[in-house]
Amino acid sequence: MIEILTQMTLSELLLLISSVIMLIGSIGLFRFRDVYTRTHAATLITVGGVCFSLLVIGFSIFMADFLSIHLIKMDLIIILILVTSPIAAQAIVESAHKQGIKPILGISRKAGVKKK
Amino acid sequence: MVYIYIVLLSMMFVIIRLVKGPTFADRLVALSAFTTITILLIVIASMQTGMLLYLDIALLLSLLSFVGVLAIAKGGYKK
Protein backbone atom coordinates (compact mmCIF):
# COMPACT_ATOMS: atom_id res chain seq x y z
CA MET A 1 0.00 0.00 0.00
CA ILE A 2 2.81 2.40 0.91
CA GLU A 3 4.67 1.47 -2.27
CA ILE A 4 1.61 2.46 -4.31
CA LEU A 5 1.41 5.75 -2.44
CA THR A 6 5.08 6.55 -3.03
CA GLN A 7 4.82 5.79 -6.72
CA MET A 8 1.87 8.16 -7.14
CA THR A 9 2.41 11.72 -8.12
CA LEU A 10 0.95 14.41 -5.91
CA SER A 11 -1.84 15.34 -8.33
CA GLU A 12 -3.03 11.72 -8.58
CA LEU A 13 -3.14 11.49 -4.78
CA LEU A 14 -5.14 14.72 -4.48
CA LEU A 15 -7.53 13.62 -7.24
CA LEU A 16 -8.06 10.32 -5.42
CA ILE A 17 -8.83 12.16 -2.15
CA SER A 18 -11.32 14.46 -3.90
CA SER A 19 -13.06 11.53 -5.60
CA VAL A 20 -13.39 9.74 -2.25
CA ILE A 21 -14.96 12.92 -0.80
CA MET A 22 -17.34 12.96 -3.76
CA LEU A 23 -18.25 9.30 -3.16
CA ILE A 24 -19.00 10.06 0.51
CA GLY A 25 -21.24 12.94 -0.55
CA SER A 26 -23.14 10.86 -3.08
CA ILE A 27 -23.70 8.03 -0.58
CA GLY A 28 -25.05 10.69 1.78
CA LEU A 29 -27.34 11.95 -0.99
CA PHE A 30 -28.53 8.37 -1.49
CA ARG A 31 -29.07 7.42 2.15
CA PHE A 32 -30.30 10.56 3.93
CA ARG A 33 -34.03 10.77 4.55
CA ASP A 34 -34.96 14.39 4.06
CA VAL A 35 -34.62 17.22 1.53
CA TYR A 36 -32.64 19.43 3.88
CA THR A 37 -30.02 16.84 4.86
CA ARG A 38 -29.74 15.74 1.23
CA THR A 39 -28.95 19.34 0.30
CA HIS A 40 -26.11 19.21 2.83
CA ALA A 41 -24.70 16.09 1.14
CA ALA A 42 -25.06 17.60 -2.35
CA THR A 43 -23.08 20.65 -1.23
CA LEU A 44 -20.33 18.25 -0.13
CA ILE A 45 -20.27 16.84 -3.69
CA THR A 46 -20.03 20.30 -5.22
CA VAL A 47 -17.38 21.89 -3.01
CA GLY A 48 -15.33 18.97 -1.74
CA GLY A 49 -15.44 16.92 -4.91
CA VAL A 50 -15.80 18.98 -8.06
CA CYS A 51 -14.17 22.27 -7.04
CA PHE A 52 -11.24 20.47 -5.39
CA SER A 53 -10.69 18.32 -8.50
CA LEU A 54 -10.86 21.36 -10.80
CA LEU A 55 -8.36 23.15 -8.55
CA VAL A 56 -5.95 20.21 -8.80
CA ILE A 57 -6.33 20.03 -12.61
CA GLY A 58 -5.79 23.80 -12.81
CA PHE A 59 -2.59 23.54 -10.79
CA SER A 60 -1.32 20.78 -13.07
CA ILE A 61 -2.03 23.02 -16.08
CA PHE A 62 -0.16 25.80 -14.27
CA MET A 63 2.84 23.51 -13.78
CA ALA A 64 2.82 22.40 -17.44
CA ASP A 65 2.77 25.83 -19.07
CA PHE A 66 2.91 28.89 -16.94
CA LEU A 67 -0.05 31.10 -17.87
CA SER A 68 -2.48 30.28 -20.63
CA ILE A 69 -6.04 31.03 -21.63
CA HIS A 70 -7.12 27.54 -20.54
CA LEU A 71 -6.05 28.27 -16.96
CA ILE A 72 -8.18 31.41 -16.97
CA LYS A 73 -11.17 29.45 -18.27
CA MET A 74 -10.64 26.84 -15.54
CA ASP A 75 -10.50 29.51 -12.82
CA LEU A 76 -13.65 31.05 -14.25
CA ILE A 77 -15.45 27.68 -13.99
CA ILE A 78 -14.30 27.23 -10.36
CA ILE A 79 -15.38 30.73 -9.30
CA LEU A 80 -18.71 30.34 -11.11
CA ILE A 81 -19.48 27.02 -9.39
CA LEU A 82 -18.43 28.36 -5.99
CA VAL A 83 -20.66 31.43 -6.37
CA THR A 84 -23.75 29.88 -7.93
CA SER A 85 -24.03 26.58 -6.00
CA PRO A 86 -25.09 28.05 -2.59
CA ILE A 87 -27.62 30.32 -4.32
CA ALA A 88 -29.23 27.36 -6.10
CA ALA A 89 -29.25 25.25 -2.91
CA GLN A 90 -30.82 28.07 -0.94
CA ALA A 91 -33.50 28.60 -3.59
CA ILE A 92 -34.34 24.87 -3.64
CA VAL A 93 -34.59 24.67 0.15
CA GLU A 94 -36.63 27.87 0.37
CA SER A 95 -39.16 26.69 -2.19
CA ALA A 96 -39.36 23.26 -0.51
CA HIS A 97 -40.06 24.99 2.79
CA LYS A 98 -42.64 27.20 1.12
CA GLN A 99 -44.34 24.17 -0.39
CA GLY A 100 -44.81 22.67 3.04
CA ILE A 101 -42.25 19.87 3.30
CA LYS A 102 -41.56 19.27 6.99
CA PRO A 103 -38.13 18.14 8.17
CA ILE A 104 -38.02 14.71 9.78
CA LEU A 105 -36.89 15.09 13.39
CA GLY A 106 -35.62 12.46 15.81
CA ILE A 107 -33.60 9.30 15.31
CA SER A 108 -35.40 6.85 13.03
CA ARG A 109 -32.60 4.74 11.66
CA LYS A 110 -34.08 1.50 12.98
CA ALA A 111 -37.57 0.43 11.95
CA GLY A 112 -39.87 0.83 14.89
CA VAL A 113 -38.48 3.97 16.41
CA LYS A 114 -40.98 6.78 16.13
CA LYS A 115 -41.24 8.21 12.65
CA LYS A 116 -43.22 11.34 11.98
CA MET B 1 -7.21 5.00 -13.48
CA VAL B 2 -9.20 4.47 -10.30
CA TYR B 3 -10.27 8.11 -10.08
CA ILE B 4 -12.67 8.10 -13.01
CA TYR B 5 -14.35 4.91 -11.82
CA ILE B 6 -15.00 6.40 -8.38
CA VAL B 7 -16.48 9.50 -10.03
CA LEU B 8 -18.76 7.33 -12.19
CA LEU B 9 -19.82 5.29 -9.12
CA SER B 10 -20.80 8.47 -7.26
CA MET B 11 -22.68 9.60 -10.38
CA MET B 12 -24.62 6.32 -10.26
CA PHE B 13 -25.82 7.05 -6.70
CA VAL B 14 -26.90 10.54 -7.80
CA ILE B 15 -28.84 9.08 -10.75
CA ILE B 16 -30.61 6.61 -8.44
CA ARG B 17 -31.70 9.50 -6.19
CA LEU B 18 -32.76 11.43 -9.31
CA VAL B 19 -35.02 8.58 -10.44
CA LYS B 20 -36.61 7.55 -7.14
CA GLY B 21 -36.74 10.83 -5.23
CA PRO B 22 -40.00 10.98 -3.30
CA THR B 23 -40.65 14.71 -3.63
CA PHE B 24 -39.87 17.19 -6.37
CA ALA B 25 -37.22 19.01 -4.34
CA ASP B 26 -35.20 15.79 -3.94
CA ARG B 27 -35.05 15.43 -7.70
CA LEU B 28 -34.00 19.06 -8.03
CA VAL B 29 -31.15 18.63 -5.53
CA ALA B 30 -29.99 15.50 -7.37
CA LEU B 31 -30.22 17.31 -10.73
CA SER B 32 -28.02 20.12 -9.44
CA ALA B 33 -25.38 17.64 -8.23
CA PHE B 34 -25.67 15.69 -11.52
CA THR B 35 -24.91 18.70 -13.71
CA THR B 36 -22.00 19.65 -11.46
CA ILE B 37 -20.43 16.19 -11.84
CA THR B 38 -21.07 16.43 -15.60
CA ILE B 39 -19.00 19.65 -15.72
CA LEU B 40 -16.12 17.78 -14.05
CA LEU B 41 -16.43 14.91 -16.57
CA ILE B 42 -16.34 17.34 -19.51
CA VAL B 43 -13.17 18.95 -18.12
CA ILE B 44 -11.56 15.50 -17.66
CA ALA B 45 -12.48 14.56 -21.24
CA SER B 46 -10.96 17.83 -22.42
CA MET B 47 -7.72 17.05 -20.58
CA GLN B 48 -7.57 13.44 -21.80
CA THR B 49 -8.26 14.05 -25.48
CA GLY B 50 -6.42 17.36 -25.73
CA MET B 51 -9.43 19.13 -27.21
CA LEU B 52 -9.18 22.28 -25.11
CA LEU B 53 -12.25 23.71 -26.85
CA TYR B 54 -14.40 21.59 -24.50
CA LEU B 55 -13.67 23.98 -21.64
CA ASP B 56 -16.01 26.50 -23.24
CA ILE B 57 -18.77 23.88 -23.19
CA ALA B 58 -18.14 23.25 -19.49
CA LEU B 59 -18.34 26.99 -18.77
CA LEU B 60 -21.60 27.25 -20.71
CA LEU B 61 -23.06 24.21 -18.93
CA SER B 62 -22.24 25.65 -15.50
CA LEU B 63 -24.05 28.89 -16.39
CA LEU B 64 -27.08 27.13 -17.90
CA SER B 65 -27.45 24.64 -15.04
CA PHE B 66 -27.53 27.50 -12.53
CA VAL B 67 -30.18 29.37 -14.48
CA GLY B 68 -32.24 26.23 -15.04
CA VAL B 69 -32.20 25.07 -11.44
CA LEU B 70 -33.07 28.57 -10.22
CA ALA B 71 -35.96 28.87 -12.69
CA ILE B 72 -37.39 25.45 -11.76
CA ALA B 73 -37.01 26.17 -8.04
CA LYS B 74 -38.72 29.54 -8.27
CA GLY B 75 -41.64 28.70 -10.49
CA GLY B 76 -41.70 25.08 -11.55
CA TYR B 77 -43.89 23.58 -8.86
CA LYS B 78 -47.39 22.40 -9.51
CA LYS B 79 -49.94 23.91 -7.18
Image (tube, coloured by chain):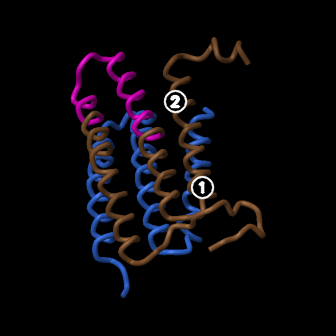
Magenta stretch in the rendered image: A49-74
Q: Label 2 lies in what chain? A: A
User: Residue B35: which quarter of the image?
Assistant: bottom left
Assign the magenta stretch its main secondary structure: helix
> Above or below — where is A2 with respect to B48?
above
Q: Which mark is residue A15?
A: 2
> Above or below — where is A57 with respect to A95?
above
- Horizontal and vertical percent position of residue A97: 39, 71
> Above or below — where is B62 with respect to A77?
below
Depth check: give the residue in front, A60 or A79.
A79
Q: Label 1 lies in what chain? A: B
- Horizontal and vertical percent position of residue B19: 56, 70
**Amino acid at dot 2:** Leu
Secondary structure of residue under mark 1: helix
Q: Residue at x 62, y 62 (%)?
A: A106
- Horizontal and vertical percent position of residue B3: 58, 35
